[in-house]
Image: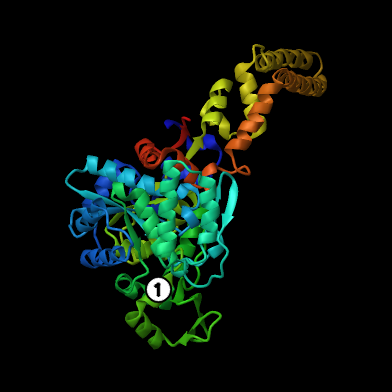
């Protein structure tokens, strides 16, 4: 794969607030602690206070990997051992347990975390940096994870679901897997991936275990550590914060105030906190906790607690309490020796809401790194881009703008009347001055004529452009087909298309090349052109 890079703003696909963060807009300084650059990491390493119990973390990871139906890769085992050392830190990313890994950006997130860990090791050789994939096993939005797209075809997992998705049985997945395997083809790489998929979903009883196995197989050579935080010994470390926040509702107050401050800078907060930001978790159950009439209740159930009972339940059974989207980041930083979080654009913006909560609970706020984004151009599309002489950034423009940019760059004729309009403007300034000297009342009439003639020039310019488009009708059709092939229903490829066909073509080298090409601290959008 050959990589080229463009500015995120040139894609026209990322929110203005995110671009401001990447550009280190001073108005956003108060919403984070350390800049997303090497200097920021140097400062954080100097200041870092690790809250995590390293021994418990290593013990839990060993236990979780022991249940995997495959020998643990030596590179991963070494990484887990390193986590017990005081000079080892994590670079984390997290995501839902999407079927067959879901969209491409799932792979991009993890690749970014791995690459950043490598770059930090080169920059700070006396420290160790372990990339961690935090499995969002406690999420319960089945409709978001039960499908994927491969070659634009939707493949769905039909099943009844309730409770945390990580605990869902995998016994009904093989039917969807057959459809997926049929799309992969029969190349050696396709058969290898197909085999891993079968081992993941047929030899592991729940979605969390299956996902760990599959992701481990894809990234085992890069030392990725996979964590399921749905564990009583890990949640025990977070129990005091859970009790305090449920009873005092501190995060609700602090984040609500921060959201008002963000709004004043022009950023609408993507997530709004609740008074209580925890769920009650049990087999086949994950429901919100609410405080009503002096009692803590679990919605849609008969379960309720007094304050004393709630404290006792959290202390004795912390695994029955599950943080929501605004508390999960604090839980992460409590149990990991973490330096950075790799997230998508919306994630970065909602993390900016959380700094005051981190300060209140005396947790270090990690450095926020936008995951690498990419567009994969197959050989046919890459050939068309080359033949049409397109710059990569033009691909992301709306179709009309794309056509106009191509025409202006490739026409042998002069289509812009900008110079003429400037001359026209200067001429009318002279005419208006002449009219003013003769009779002041003639000036409005002169200005009205100028407006009409200027509009006529604009219309003429449009006609010149339209005529030249007709002269290049074949190229215009090719541009339409090219953009349709590249963007699925108008959205970025990475937000829908699965990685499967690309892995079937290139095998593990596909992931190796992603990691090699990504530059986590450069903040550029990557365009890959693929060979046949």
Eyeballing the image, is 442 above or below 528?
Answer: above
What coloring was used for the rendering?
rainbow
Q: Secondary structure at mark 1?
A: helix
Left or right of 53 on screen, residue 447: right
Left or right of 295 on screen, residue 341: left
**Observer-nearest of 139 and 14:** 139
The N terminus: image quadrant: top left
Eyeballing the image, is 39 above or below 403?
Answer: below
The residue under the point 67% across, 12% down is 413
Residue 47, by quadrant, is bottom left
**Observer-nearest of 474 and 39:** 474
Residue 398, by quadrant, is top right
Left or right of 346 on screen, residue 55: left
Q: How many marks?
A: 1
Residue 108, x across and y down, in percent: 42, 45
The residue under the point 50% across, 38% down is 375
**Observer-nearest of 356 and 209:** 209
Residue 185, x across and y down, in percent: 51, 44
Counting other residues with Cα less than 10 Å from the Cα at mark 1, is it few (<14), some (14-19), or many (20 or more)? Answer: many
Q: Which residue is mark 1?
A: 245
Residue 227 seen in the figure: yes
Residue 158, x across and y down, in percent: 58, 64
Eyeballing the image, is 57 above or below 309?
Answer: above
Residue 25 seen in the figure: no
Eyeballing the image, is 146 above or below 340?
Answer: below
Residue 363, by quadrant, is bottom left
């Amino acid at each position: 794969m050959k990589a080229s890079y463009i500015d995120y703003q040139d894609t026209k696909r990322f929110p203005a607030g995110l671009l401001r963060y990447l550009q280190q807009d001073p108005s956003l300084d108060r919403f984070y602690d350390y800049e997303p650059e090497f200097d920021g990491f140097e400062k954080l390493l100097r200041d870092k206070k690790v809250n995590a119990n390293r021994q418990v973390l290593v013990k839990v990871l060993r236990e979780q990997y022991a249940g995997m139906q495959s020998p643990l890769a030596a590179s991963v085992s070494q990484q887990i051992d390193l986590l017990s050392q005081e000079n080892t830190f994590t670079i984390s990313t997290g995501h839902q347990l999407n079927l067959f890994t879901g969209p491409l950006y799932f792979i991009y997130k993890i690749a970014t975390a791995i690459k950043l860990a490598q770059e930090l090791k080169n920059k700070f050789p006396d420290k160790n940096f372990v990339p961690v994939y935090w499995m969002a096993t406690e999420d319960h939005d089945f409709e978001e994870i039960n499908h994927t797209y491969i070659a634009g075809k939707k493949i769905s997992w039909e099943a009844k679901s309730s409770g945390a998705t990580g605990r869902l049985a995998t016994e009904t997945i093989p039917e969807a897997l057959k459809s997926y395997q049929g799309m992969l083809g029969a190349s050696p790489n396709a058969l290898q991936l197909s085999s891993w998929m079968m081992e993941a979903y047929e030899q592991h009883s729940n979605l969390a275990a299956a996902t760990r196995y599959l992701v481990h197989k894809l990234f085992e050579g890069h030392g990725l550590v996979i964590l399921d935080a749905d564990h009583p010994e890990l949640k025990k470390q977070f129990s005091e914060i859970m009790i305090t926040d449920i009873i005092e509702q501190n995060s609700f107050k602090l984040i609500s105030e921060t959201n008002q401050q963000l709004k004043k800078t022009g950023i609408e907060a993507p997530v709004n906190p609740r008074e209580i930001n925890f769920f009650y978790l049990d087999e086949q159950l994950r429901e919100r906790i609410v405080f009503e009439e002096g009692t803590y209740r679990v919605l849609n159930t008969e379960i309720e607690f007094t304050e004393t009972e709630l404290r006792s339940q959290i202390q004795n059974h912390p695994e029955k309490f599950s943080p929501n989207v605004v508390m999960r980041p604090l839980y992460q930083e409590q149990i990991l020796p973490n330096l950075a979080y790799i997230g998508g654009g919306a994630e970065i913006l909602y993390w900016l809401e959380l700094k005051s909560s981190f300060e209140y609970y005396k947790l270090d706020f990690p450095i926020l790194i936008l995951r690498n984004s990419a567009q994969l151009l197959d050989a046919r599309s890459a050939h068309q881009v080359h033949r049409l002489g397109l710059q990569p950034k033009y691909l992301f423009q709306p179709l009309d703008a794309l056509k106009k940019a191509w025409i202006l760059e490739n026409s042998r004729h002069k289509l812009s009347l900008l110079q003429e309009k400037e001359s026209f403007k200067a001429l009318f300034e002279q005419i208006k001055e002449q009219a003013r000297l003769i009779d002041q009342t003639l000036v409005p009439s002169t200005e009205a004529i100028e407006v009409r003639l200027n509009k006529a020039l604009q219309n003429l310019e449009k006609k010149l452009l339209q005529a030249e488009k007709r002269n290049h009708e074949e190229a215009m059709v090719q541009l339409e087909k090219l953009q349709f092939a590249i963007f699925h229903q108008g959205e970025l490829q990475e937000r829908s298309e699965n990685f499967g066909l690309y892995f079937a073509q290139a095998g593990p080298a596909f992931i190796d090349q992603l990691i090699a090409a990504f530059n986590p601290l450069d903040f550029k959008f990557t365009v890959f052109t693929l060979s046949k």
